[in-house]
Amino acid sequence: MKSTKMAEKNAVVRACEYMLPPEIRLFDDPYSDKFVTSFNQFTIRIMKSKRLYNWIMGLSEKLSPGVNGGIVCRIRYIDDALLKAIEDGFEAVVNLGGGYDTRCLRIENIGKLEYYHIDQPEVIDSFRERMARLSAGVPSNVRFVQIDFNVQSLEEELVRAGYDKTKKTIFIWEGVSQYISEEALVDTFEYIASTNAGNRVVFTYVLKEYLTNPEAFPKYKNIIKLIEKFGIKWINGLSPENMCDYLKANGLNLIEDVGSAEYQERYLTPIGRVMDVMPIERISLAEVI
C-alpha cells in the first residue's frame, strides 16, 4: 500500500544512518531495519562497507538531492525536542502519522511516558505486527491509534484510546502536513491548542513557495515528481515568514523555526560531516498558549 511504502522508505533512511560509525551518526536506531523488506535489509547490511555506503548514497543524491540529509537532520531535531520534553517532566507523547517511527523503542526513558502512535489503519496494523515479532515485543506504554486525518476526528480517536488531554504532552508531526488539506491541518493545530498550556508540538512542513513554483528551486525541482511515483501528492505548504502569525491564530506560540542552514550549523559542521540538506522542508517547534 502507498502509505506503508512511505513508512518503509523512511525506516530505510534511519537504518542506513545506523550503518555509519558512531562518531558521525546523528542518532542511533538499531530497530528500523526490522521494519523493512528482506531486500532492503540486505541493502542496509552491505552499507556497513564505507565504499558501498558512499556509492549507494551517491546514487540516491543524484535522484533526490538533499532528501536523505533533510530526513536525518529532522529526525535528530525531533529526538532532541523529545528528550527535552522528557527532561522537563512531560507525561505523554502523541506521534501523529508516526509510520514505522521507532522512537517508542530507542529514546532513553521514553517508557516513563504514555505513547500514542497514530497513523492510517494499514500502517498501524503492519507496524504493530512487525513490532510484536521483536524479542521485547510491544512496549507496555505504547497505544496504537488508527486515523485518517482528512476525515476522522483526532480528538475522538485519542479519547477512545484513553488519552487525557490534561496531561503534559508533546505532539510529534513528522512528514505529514504536506499530504493533508488545509482544513485538516488547522483542525489538528486547534485540537493541540485545546490541550494544556505549555504543551508542545514539533512539526515539519514543505515550503508553499516550492509547491507553487518548483522551478525556483532548480536543484530540487524533481523531488515532488519522485514523491508522486509513490502514488501520493504534496498538496499543502506553509511559509516560514508567516509562521509566527499563522500559529498564533491557531492558539500556538512559535518557539523556533529552522531549516537547512540551522541543521548544518548545529548537527553537521561540528562533526565534520559534509551533506546536502534540502531547503524545501523546514521544522517548527511551538507551544500551546
Image (cartoon, rainbow, N blue to C red):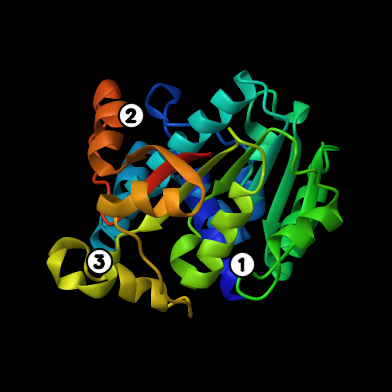
Name the front one of labels 2 and 3: 3
Depicted 250 relative to depicted 148: above or below = above
Task: Return the disc, 1 or 2, that comes first in the chain's sequence.
Answer: 1
Residue 230: percent from the left, percent from the top?
A: 47, 75
* Residue 216, label in figure: none
Residue picked out by circle 1: 4
Front of the two marks 1 and 3: 3
At horizontal 32% and vertical 71% (from top left) the residue drawn is 224
**Can the viewer see residue 258?**
yes
Identify the mark nearer the N-term, 2 or 3: 3
* CA separation in Å, label 1 and label 2: 29 Å
Q: Are marks 2 and 3 in contact (CB under 8 Å)?
A: no
Residue type for callout 3: Tyr
Q: Amino acid at mark 2?
A: Tyr
Residue visible at 78% across and 53% down?
A: 144
Up-down: is 259 above or below 179? above
Q: Which residue position holds label 3?
A: 210
Q: In this image, 140 relative to 107: left or right?
A: right
Q: Secondary structure at mark 1?
A: helix
Residue 148 lies in quadrant: bottom right
Label 1 to label 3: alpha-carbon separation? 25 Å
- In which quadrant will I find the N terminus? bottom right
Looking at the image, is mark 1 or mark 3 earlier in the sequence?
1
> The disc labelled 1 sits on which kind of residue?
Thr
Q: Nearer the viewer, residue 40 or 246?
A: 246
Residue that numbered label 2 is attached to: 267
**Residue 26 percent coordinates (x, y):** 42, 31
Element carrying mark 3? helix
Q: Nearer the viewer, residue 120 or 184?
A: 184
**Are circles 1 and 3 on residues that touch, CB within 8 Å?**
no
